[in-house]
């Protein structure tokens, strides 16, 4: 009965509303500093399409980083919490595309490519939905190569908040803090994988996102989160757990 209660549409709707209100509370009661936003804001102001990328663990405040008028579509998995996230961002005027770049990848990528063709913003967590933490998967590379639009990384941290013990070390910002939003530089992925182009782009996205996240944590007095160990034994463990 309790499981059915949690799966009910009304409960998911309430949870999504509460999550959206919490994001609003943190955003409005904190003082935010935005850094290196020039190029990203030009894309937003000109309504030029791009792929917005951030680590899964920094998902909470991401509905606040784009301009209010921007048309945003977020790739959200079919996992249990996906519906709550979808409803939460809906209250911020953002739309969701259900699926992932691993399970059921083709329909999800097609939908995201359509969004980019319509000159809108496609949002993806390159290490989601299950990790390894802070390690870029192939989906974002395929999407950028096929669409021809850049990947722009972003991250945030706050002086008031903590990382959970989840696989992604999900960062929960708290109200009345000082936060920073750090944007990275646009990363272009060639259409053809020549001379290791895809691997190079993958490393660049991963390095920028990790540097941005760790720099944001340092500026806010938080202990920087480290990427997951991607040794074969650890990667296998992540797949089967």
Image: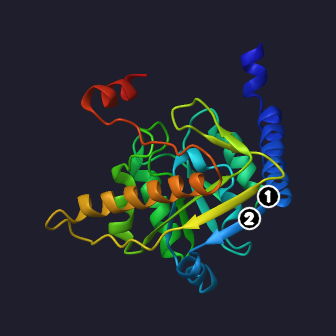
Quarter of the N terminus within the rendering: top right
Q: Residue at x 53, y 81 (%)?
A: 39
The local secondary structure at tag 1 comes to helix
Q: Which residue lies furthest to the left in this view?
A: 195
Relative depth, front residue between 86 and 107? 86
SS for callout 2: strand
Q: In which quarter of the image is residue 211?
A: bottom left
Could one spot residue 54 in this view of the protein?
no
Q: Mark 1 or mark 2: which comes first in sequence? A: 1
CA distance separating discs 1 and 2: 8 Å
Q: Is residue 131 above or below residue 42?
A: above
Q: Is residue 95 left or right of residue 202?
A: right
Horizontal side, residue 194 vs residue 65: left or right: left
Residue 193 x, y percent position in the rendering: 20, 65
> Which residue in the protein does label 2 denote?
32
| Image spot of residue 147 (x, y percent) | 39, 71
Task: Please report the residue visible at 43 percent of the width from the left and 22 percent of the height from the top.
Answer: 241
**Residue 51: x and y, percent?**
49, 66
Q: How crowded is mark 2: few (under 14 residues within 10 Å), some or many (20 or more)?
A: some
On the image, which quarter does residue 181 sit in?
bottom right
Quarter of the image where one finds residue 3: top right
Left or right: 181 with respect to 151?
Answer: right
Query: In the image, which disc is placed on residue 27?
Result: 1
Marks 1,2: beta carbons within 8 A: yes
Q: Which residue is found at the position 42% from the left and 61% from the top?
A: 208
Classify 118 as above or below 72: below
Indicate which label's residue lies in the foreground, 1 or 2: 2
**Residue 89: mark in rendering:** none
Q: Which of 137 and 214 is in front in this view?
A: 214
Identify the residue at horizontal 63%, vertical 84% (top origin): 45
Nearest the viewer among 136 and 180 is 180
């Amino acid at each position: 009965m309790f499981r059915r209660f949690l799966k009910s549409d009304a409960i998911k709707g309430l949870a999504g509303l509460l999550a959206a209100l919490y994001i609003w509370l943190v955003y409005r009661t904190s003082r935010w500093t935005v850094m290196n936003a020039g190029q990203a804001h030009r894309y937003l102001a000109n309504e030029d399409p791009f792929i917005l990328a951030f680590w899964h663990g920094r998902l909470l405040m991401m509905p606040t980083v784009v301009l209010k008028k921007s048309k945003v579509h977020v790739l959200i998995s079919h996992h249990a919490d996906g519906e709550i996230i979808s409803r939460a961002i809906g209250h911020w005027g953002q739309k969701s595309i259900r699926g992932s770049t691993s399970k059921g990848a083709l329909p999800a990528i097609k939908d995201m490519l359509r969004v980019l063709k319509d000159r809108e913003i496609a949002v993806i967590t390159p290490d989601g939905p299950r990790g390894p933490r802070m390690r870029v998967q192939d989906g974002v590379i395929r999407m950028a190569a096929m669409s021809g639009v850049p990947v722009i990384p972003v991250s945030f941290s706050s002086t008031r908040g903590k990382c959970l013990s989840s696989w992604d070390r999900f960062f929960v910002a708290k109200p009345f803090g000082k936060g920073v939003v750090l944007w990275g530089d646009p990363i272009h992925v060639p259409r053809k994988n020549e001379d290791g182009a895809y691997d190079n782009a993958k490393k660049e996205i991963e390095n920028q996102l990790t540097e941005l996240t760790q720099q944001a944590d340092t500026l806010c007095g938080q202990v920087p989160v480290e990427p997951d160990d991607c040794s074969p034994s650890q990667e296998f463990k992540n797949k089967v757990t």
